[in-house]
Amino acid sequence: MDDELTWRSGFKDVLPTVFGYIGIGLAFGIIAKTSRFSVLAAVLMSLIVYGGSAQFVMVSMLAVHSPLGAVVLSSALINARMGLMSMTVAPLLQRESLFQNITAGSLLTDETFALTMNKLNHTGRTLHSSWLHAANLAAYLVWALATLVGAMAGQLIPDPDVLGLDFAVVAMFIGLLYLQVITDRTHPLVKQVGIAVFVAVLMVILMRFMAGNLAILAATVLGCLFGMAVSRHD
């Protein structure tokens, strides 16, 4: 990863990340097909909803004929964290047009957000919409294509868990976190690791009292507040 913020650099930087999209996209396509969704319906869901965990929940709920309101509410709660990520990226694009901000935010994902935070360590904490659009678009297209392939192969692979595809995104995030920690020179390593451990422990505790997606959102907010408190103390 370098300090360029061009379209070409965006595509190049996101390439290692899209392997996670391939694994989980294949898994979603397979699960959608085995849940009696058509190939077209699975691909359209990936193109319109474009939310990995939300799509898995939607497929499982629609397969058992859950009320539409419950499906919409569940998806909204699962993706509520995207508001926090968008508010983090928005100040970096404040000189861009409203259209550029809307399109960048519409395709922002957990993975491209983490990639963006890592990129800032190489660009002096600056960002350009061209780089982010390229990263977002590449991830978007790979996700849709992986869904298509997975849905077409759904009848041949009834149980995607046996292939370990469900661990692809987890492994990817571990790699992104590692890169973020070793490249960020603005904060001591001990502080970064300490905050990460705090959020992890908090997540485990919160999951005992609330749903997993709400626990993620709460742990993220509390982790941010904890990080701010530690930074001010220093």
Image: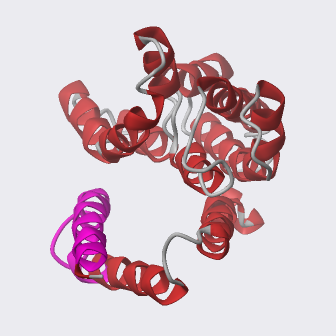
Q: How is the image coloured?
A: secondary structure
What residue is shown at x 69% (from left), y 61% (from top)?
A: 168
- Residue 142 relative to residue 106: left or right: right
Where is residue 88 shown, x and y percent of the image? 38, 44
Q: Residue 132, percent across and down? A: 62, 32
Q: Is residue 139 left or right of residue 120?
A: right
- Residue 95 position, x and y percent, is 45, 21
Front residue of 223 and 147: 223
Tell me if residue 33 comes above or below residue 21 in the rendering: above
The picture quadrant where one finds residue 151 is top right
Is residue 52 something that shows in the picture?
yes
* Above or below for 149 versus 226: above
Examine the rendered structure and indicate whether residue 121 appears above or below residue 198.
above
- The quadrant in which residue 34 appears is top right
User: Which residues make up the magenta segment?
Assistant: 204-232
- What secondary structure is the magenta-colored segment mainly? helix
The quadrant where residue 39 appears: top right
Residue 228 among those drawn in magenta: yes
Task: Examine the structure image and report whether residue 233 is included in the region drawn in magenta.
Answer: no
- Determine the residue positioned at 58% across, 47% down: 116
Q: Is residue 67 left or right of 146 when viewed as pictured?
A: left
What residue is at 52 percent from the left and 69 percent from the top?
186
Q: Quadrant of the C terminus?
A: bottom left
